[in-house]
Amino acid sequence: MNTSFWKAGHTPTLFAAFLYFDLSFMVWYVLGPLGVQIATDLGLTTQQRAMMVATPILSGAVLRFLMGLLADRTSPKSAGILGQAIVIAALAVAWTMGIDSYEQALLLGLFLGVAGASFAVALPLASQWYPPQHQGKAMGIAGAGNSGTVLAALFAPGLAAAFGWNNVFGLALIPLVLTLVIFATCARNAPERPQPKSVSDYLKALADRDSWWFMLFYSVTFGGFLGLASTLPGYFHDQYGFDPVKAGYYTAACVFAGSLLRPLGGALADRIGGIRTLLVMYTLAALCIAVVGFNLPSSTAALALFVVAMLSLGAGNGAVFQLVPQRFRKEIGVMTGLIGMAGGIGGFALTAGLGTIKQSTGDYQLGLWLFASLGVIAWIGLHGVKKRWRTTWGSAAVTAARV
């Protein structure tokens, strides 16, 4: 983080993007930490609880594509303001009218997906201000907004125990409104922005095989981070009999680790290369998740392994988005939407899948092992493309960044 980085872009926009993303992530994820309490009051099964928690993830994944189009056609700042206003309105309705059924909880989850779509706003807003050699740091700082999961995991269960889980939606409106004011005041669109992309541009991007590789890699790193973050409150409750508040604390430790390492992962990728960083992170994450899958009797040991896994996945998120602007600098808006959508779909699949497997088999073992296997597949795929990437768009003759 040398002085040239802070002079290269627009710092108020960078931190406004981070704050907007952080609070959006908080409410996007809030049903996860509240899942046990809501499921108890509404009489939901484990599978229904998992689906309720996973619905905002899937909604956010799809809406990232639409939000990316909106950000292209208007501006990232305008899209962010509109998205935040929709989320505030949805939470206000849920707070004042209440959530009394499984179906209403799913409906709220659909609207909370708009908060998840903030990814397609915050990252282009920040990225467009910075040159290639600083993309990892800029995208890492803006993307560190996924630390909003920590706020939800840390405070939502306790507030729900004290005031009722429905009132948590009302309390969340306070920081959301303040953030909207700060974002509208401080954020600025970059003076040089790519031309708006059409649907055909997205289809053209999907015809590039590298798009699919990046979507796979991010569906494992970000999808793994978000899917585990959403599942862990229920996991610690089911596996070790923790009450919702204690399960929230354990989850907060895990998601804090992953959020902290995202910007550091981007900075590390700037220094040693995104490919090398990702290979190490996939290895660590797969090993840790595989060991946890043995249903460890010690909650402390499980916590330690989940923390390392989340550290690795968080750093992997930063590394992926150190590489994306090098390969798709002119298509960064398109690719941010597509790759972000893939990450969200990965998170939905992991959350819903773990819940379904727990409902069917009685524990999470098979689901955790399947996810660890995906980490191995991603490692093999990345190892297979690294030579081609480093000798084409990632060569020293093409970019100043380390690939």
Image (cartoon, grey):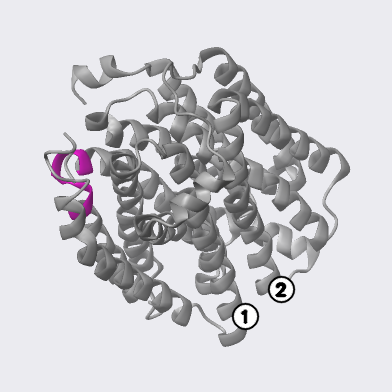
Q: Do the residues labelled 2 and 1 touch (CB within 8 Å)?
A: yes
- Taking the spot 30% from the left edge, 44% from the top edge, the residue there is 327
Residue closer to the observer: 400 or 233: 400
Res 55 → quadrant = bottom right
Res 352 → quadrant = bottom right
Residue closer to the observer: 154 or 28: 28
Q: Position of residue 155 (x, y in %)?
A: 57, 42
**Residue 303 highlighted magenta (yes or no):** no
Q: Position of residue 364 (x, y in %)?
A: 49, 77
Q: Which mark is residue 261?
A: none
Residue found farthest to the bottom: 361
Q: Position of residue 401 (x, y in %)?
A: 19, 37
User: Sequence order check: which comes first, mark 2 or mark 1?
Assistant: 2
Tell me the magenta residue range.
269-276
Residue under label 1, please give it: 359
SS assignment at label 2? loop
Q: The residue under label 1 is which amino acid type?
A: Gln
- Taking the spot 21% from the left edge, 26% from the top edge, the residue there is 1
Res 178 → quadrant = top right
Callout 1 crowding tier (Cα within 10 Å): few <14, some 14–19, many ≥20? some
Judged left or right of residue 113, residue 97 is right
The prevailing secondary structure element of the residues shown in magenta is helix
SS assignment at label 1? helix
- Taking the spot 81% from the left edge, 60% from the top edge, the residue there is 103
Residue under label 2, please give it: 45
Q: The residue under label 2 is which amino acid type?
A: Thr
